[in-house]
């Protein structure tokens, strides 16, 4: 189910502005990869190229290739909507559909894909909510609005919604930055559990979080404002945090800049 991502020589643009330059990396299946680096170095921009979300911005485009196992995501004829189904995304702010019930939030993607069978939808609701560690908290109020949950519960609801369509990869863009410390730890535990089934990529500003949850860490940096962000180094998380090759990495993780 989980797939490997191979990125080669990727340049990412907003119109004429090159926001990210020359990224080559492999993201292993059934593992957690963290993207770290100072604000503006292109972590979120790069993340969004991994499910073709980047190009929804007018003028935004990429050069280079992103392979999901043996599928080139940017080959002509590839349907970006299908890519986004295979490579799910969880955003910084929990964004459940506010007027929808908890249950309908979970199955929104499935229903959009034409699934109508009530039993199937009910099974998917329970399985996804269990997967997101939220079932016990909401099983008696599936018909209540998703917006009535706490921030941490809403974020787990968004994770349930993302996994309900059976993706192979989960991209998470600072999924805990709007959450309190307890909810953050709950999401971190969940990420650790989900990696048995998915390839997970997480953007985080929280160094402890990167070191707690990730197997590999990629450090991005930029030479100056207006210059493109680059991948400086990527390695086992332990190595990046204890014995990085590049001085800039060490300076960043030890809090000397960024
Ligand atoms: N919609 C956009 N249009 C034009 N430029 C953009 C857009 N979004 C981001 N950028 C620019 O692309 C560069 C990378 O931004 P990005 O948000 O990817 O960085 P980041 O590392 O994720 O930052 P942060 O940690 O602050 O979220 C920045 O120079 C930013 O101003």
Image (spheres, helix red, strand yellow):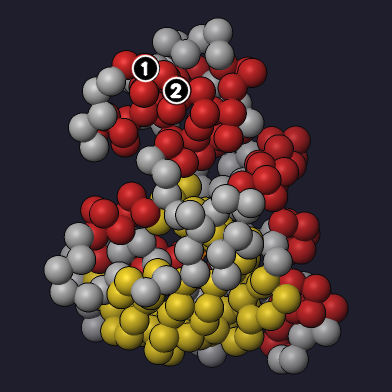
Q: Which residue is mark 1?
A: 119
Quarter of image, res 206 = bottom right
Does the numbered disc 2 mark a residue whose Cβ is under 8 Å from ligand 1?
no
Q: Position of residue 151 (x, y in %)?
A: 57, 31
Marks 2 and 1 close (CB-CB < 8 Å): yes
Ligand 1 position by quadrant: bottom left
Please indicate, yes or no, whether residue 60 appears anywhere in the rendered image: yes
- Which one is in front, 139 or 175? 139
Q: Position of residue 105 (x, y in %)?
A: 39, 27
Q: Is residue 244 above or below residue 147?
A: below
Q: Position of residue 24 (x, y in %)?
A: 48, 86
Q: Residue furthest right?
A: 242
Please indicate, yes or no, whether residue 45 appears anywhere in the rendered image: no
Using a 10 Å C-alpha cutoff, classify the residue at mark 2 as few (fewer than 14 neighbours), some (14 to 19) or many (20 or more): few
- Which one is in front, 239 or 168? 168
Q: Is residue 183 above or below residue 170?
A: above
Give the residue drawn at x 33%, y 50%. Answer: 85
Q: Position of residue 141 (x, y in %)?
A: 51, 9
Q: CA distance from mark 2 to mark 1?
A: 6 Å
Give the residue drawn at x 63%, y 51%. Answer: 196
Using a 10 Å C-alpha cutoff, classify the residue at mark 1 as few (fewer than 14 neighbours), some (14 to 19) or many (20 or more): few
Q: Which residue is mark 2?
A: 123
Give the residue drawn at x 22%, y 75%. Answer: 75
Quadrant of the image for the C terminus?
bottom right
Give the residue drawn at x 54%, y 72%. Answer: 27
């Amino acid at each position: 189910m989980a797939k490997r991502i191979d990125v080669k020589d990727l340049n990412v643009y907003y119109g004429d502005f090159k926001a990210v330059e020359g990224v080559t990396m492999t993201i292993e299946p059934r593992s957690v990869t963290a993207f770290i680096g100072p604000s503006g170095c292109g972590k979120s921009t790069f993340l969004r190229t991994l499910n073709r979300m980047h190009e929804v911005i007018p003028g935004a485009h990429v050069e280079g290739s992103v392979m999901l196992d043996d599928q080139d995501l940017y080959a002509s004829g590839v349907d970006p909507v299908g890519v986004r189904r295979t490579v799910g995304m969880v955003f910084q702010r929990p964004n459940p559909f506010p007027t929808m019930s908890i249950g309908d939030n979970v199955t929104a993607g499935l229903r959009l894909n034409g699934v109508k069978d009530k039993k199937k939808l009910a099974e998917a609701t329970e399985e996804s909510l269990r997967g997101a560690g939220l079932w016990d908290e909401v099983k008696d109020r599936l018909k209540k609005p998703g917006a009535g949950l706490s921030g941490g519960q809403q974020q787990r609801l968004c994770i349930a919604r993302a996994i309900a369509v059976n993706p192979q990869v989960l991209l998470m863009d600072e999924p805990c930055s709007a959450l309190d410390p307890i909810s953050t730890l709950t999401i971190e535990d969940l990420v650790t559990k989900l990696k048995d089934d998915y390839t997970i990529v997480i953007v985080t500003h929280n160094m402890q979080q990167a070191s707690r949850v990730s197997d590999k860490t990629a450090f991005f940096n930029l030479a100056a404002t207006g210059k493109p962000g680059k991948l400086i180094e990527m390695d086992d998380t332990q190595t990046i945090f204890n014995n990085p090759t590049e001085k800039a990495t060490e300076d960043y993780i030890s809090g000397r800049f960024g």
